[in-house]
Amino acid sequence: MASSLQPLITILEGILDPHQTRWIVDENNPQLQSLLDKATSLQKLLDSKSSLTKLDSRIREVAHQAEDIIESHMVHHMLSGSNCVIFTLSTPDLQQVIRDLDSVMEQAEKLVENKILPSKSSSAAVGIDSAIEQLKLADKKTPSSSSSSSVVVGIDGDLMQLKDRLVGQQQKKLEIVPIVGMGGVGKTTIAQKLYEDPLIVDQFAFRTWTTISQDYNMLQILKSLLHCITGQEFDQQIDELKVKLHKSLFGRKYLIVLDDIWSTKFWDEMRMYFPDNNNGSRIVITTRESDVANYANSSSPPHQVQLLSKSESWNLLRQLVFGEEECPLVLQEIGPKIAEDCDGLPLAISVIGGLLSKTEISEDVWRKIGDNVIAAISGSDDRCSTILSLSYNHLPNYLKPCFLYMGAFPEDYKITRPRLVRLWVAEGFIKSNGERSLKEEAEDWLKSLVERNLFLVRVYTNGKPWSYSMHDMLRDLCIKKYGEDMFLNGPNKFTFSNPRRVSFHTKFQSEVINDSAESMSLTRSVLYIDFRSAEFPSGAFFAARLLRVLDLDMRTHRFPTEILELVNLRFLRVNLDNSGTIHIVSMPKGITRLWNLQTLIAPLFHVNEPAELWKLSELSNLELFDIRLLKDEEMNYSVLKKLEKISIRMGVQLIEEATSWDGFLKSIPNIKKLSINDRDRTTSTAIDLSHLHKLENLTCHYMTSTSSPDGFGCCFRVIFPCNIRKLNLSVCKINSGVWGTLCALQKLEELEIWQCSFERKEETCEEEWELADGDEFPSLQVLRLVHSRIVRWIADETNFPRLRHLHLYKCKRLEEIPSGIGEISTLQSIRVDWCSKSTAASAERIMEEQSENGNDDLKLYIHGTSERDDDNDEEED
């Protein structure tokens, strides 16, 4: 059930929020509050009972009707120019929606009370299949008599590591060994190979295997386990069988495989009946859910089964199709491509291998299949879809829309964490718990989808996930679900009018929709991904006045003013493709019309009317090329309590006539990320950021030093807040007095110094970075020096006691990395890109010394070297 009442609840909560100033709600007309109460109650019921699928289409229909009535009313008044509107909405249509919602609620309550669950038959079928499987397994000691002869590739490393955990370690205590991975990745195959391995068979006198599944039958599971151990049949009740299981295992060295566990509930119910005999007994569990694995064994990491590499994928496919024979020469180009398109999923390779083995061995046939491998897999066998659907069906209702949303993007598309979670927030998927921000809640949901092995982390930044994608087979599952749930139209075909969401990947796809002026009048989201047209889309698109999300990749030299008519937007991203050249575009006056805007991402735009931005009270995320602030009286600042991120490529700047940052800084009390540029300010007073207690990520452009208050020495023209975790200094002038200020930032974890000028030695006029004995960065984990002109760097391990990653980029004059850096016990990597040969050599010496001392964990990456060039130090990145 992907349908959710949460978007409707979000709209109603926004209107009824006592702190909002846009709408005056008629207290004598309780319809909106009544609608909110009913929607909230029904949503709670849906969240607790995932099997109410019979009502799914009706719930979706009623929720969409309510959203359409309310948002149409809001947009009508906004386009008419009204600043503050009395929200009465006593329309017969809304009254009918309330009655429909009452009817749905009544049906849902009856289904729950009478336990007439619509999915009962399907659940029963799963349960019967599970029971049959378990009874089959009870008749044999091994899970599959044919598994040993099946073709497997790429699991030797997995087997070696797991066998070591089962029999190679001296641990006598009972250990739980979880095997984790996405559906179809080969968890059960690996467990079977372990179970049948002669070494394992020899070590464990008692071995037993049972399959759990989503809708497990505890009685049959217990009978299966006991039959494998004792060879006998049992007819007692569950509690009696649990006690008998414990007695049967007590004092014995046993291996139990619990295949396909989905919930911690099963483990809670069974754990105490597996005795710890202190004799090296082991329990292997396979699961798609990382939280289940960590719950079963919190002291050791689970074994994560990875997708196959390109070569392993082709090796598996080749063996499945040709066995021991050679692949014909004419297929040795298309064959590896077909294997690669399976994205390393053994289940997908197995299905396509079965298809190819039954087709004509010809290049033409294979190339036709290779044109769309995922479609060929889906069309030839339901196994993939069935197995992967289990993961979707097991999701809690609130995560299903978030999962389906990823299918809107192209195959292998990488989307960053900030963009994805803000899209979810704008869609209204995320439910507030009152204490945490919607963004924080969304990030937890994203983490949960990764832990369920449904999303893949594609890029890590300093050890933290940054961008994500989805396996092509899971994306194909999403697209199939779109037709069932009417969640989204596209991206490959457009099957119904007035879709809630639409995703375009080519200009041709958008033209399909533009034929009908009414085809998008109720659409809420439009995603133009990698859209390379020079023309802004028009036609039916402009009938979509209720849009909440517009995510647009385009090639243009203007900001489309038509966007300013989309007054219901919550998320706006306009990403220009200027074919390698940076062309900055002005944003026209009128952005204040987008009163509901939460996220504005326009990285190659600057704002001519900066004061308009401070009229957007819902704004939480702002990304532009630059902003030049006017005098305080011209800006007329409003306090933007929801604004958390200001990411400006050139930094927020003051015009020359503006001398103070005070008005701006007071207007952003909850800011977490900020970029400021002090280049044109004429006064020398320090910028006081100390009251911005939530600020964690700060970029400072063109900062210089000023006389310290006591008259002795110099200090930076910034007073930092105490919670800074990431600091980027760009084109700043740094002297020795600055380091004491930075070292005092106790929570600073990441420091980037980009093209900054360091203090020069009078005798040589060469820049030098010398840290004194007392200069210690207590929490710094990441240090980057970029385009630095320093010649000597004097420091040791005491200055950076917790450093993990050092990155030097185009530091062409630097003579060497201080040898003491290698003595930092926490150091994990050194990266040297386009620095001098002597710098690269010093990094290699550090590596050699650490290797001789037994430190094999330190990684060194060197990419390119260059001779020192005093006259040309400012090359392009």
Image (cartoon, rainbow, N blue to C red):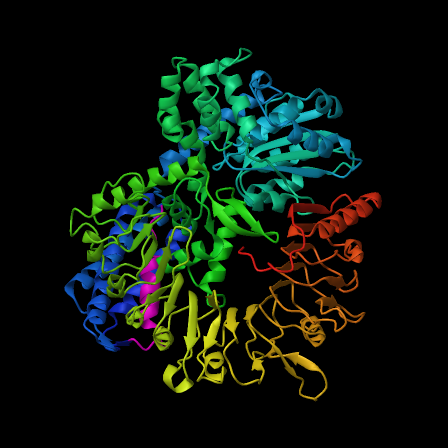
Look at the picture and state if 419 lies above or below 777: above
Residue closest to the eye, 690 or 400: 690
Query: Percent x, y for residue 424?
Result: 40, 56
For the C terminus, which image quadrant? bottom right
Q: Is residue 437 magenta?
A: no
Query: Percent x, y for residue 643?
Result: 44, 71
Query: Percent x, y for residue 127?
Result: 45, 32
Q: Is residue 20 magenta?
A: yes
Look at the picture and state if 29 lies above or below 621: below
Residue closest to the eye, 404 or 367: 367
The part of the chain drawn in magenta is 1-22
The residue located at (65%, 50%) in the rendering is: 866
Residue closest to the eye, 263 or 355: 355
Which image quarter: residue 19? bottom left
- Asked whether residue 685 is in view, the answer is yes
The residue located at (84%, 46%) in the rendering is: 853
Query: Percent x, y for residue 659?
Result: 48, 85
Residue closest to the eye, 732 or 588: 732
- In the rendered structure, the answer to whether residue 851 lies left or right of residue 567 reads right
Look at the picture and state if 451 lies above or below 78: above
Query: Which residue is at the far bottom?
Result: 710
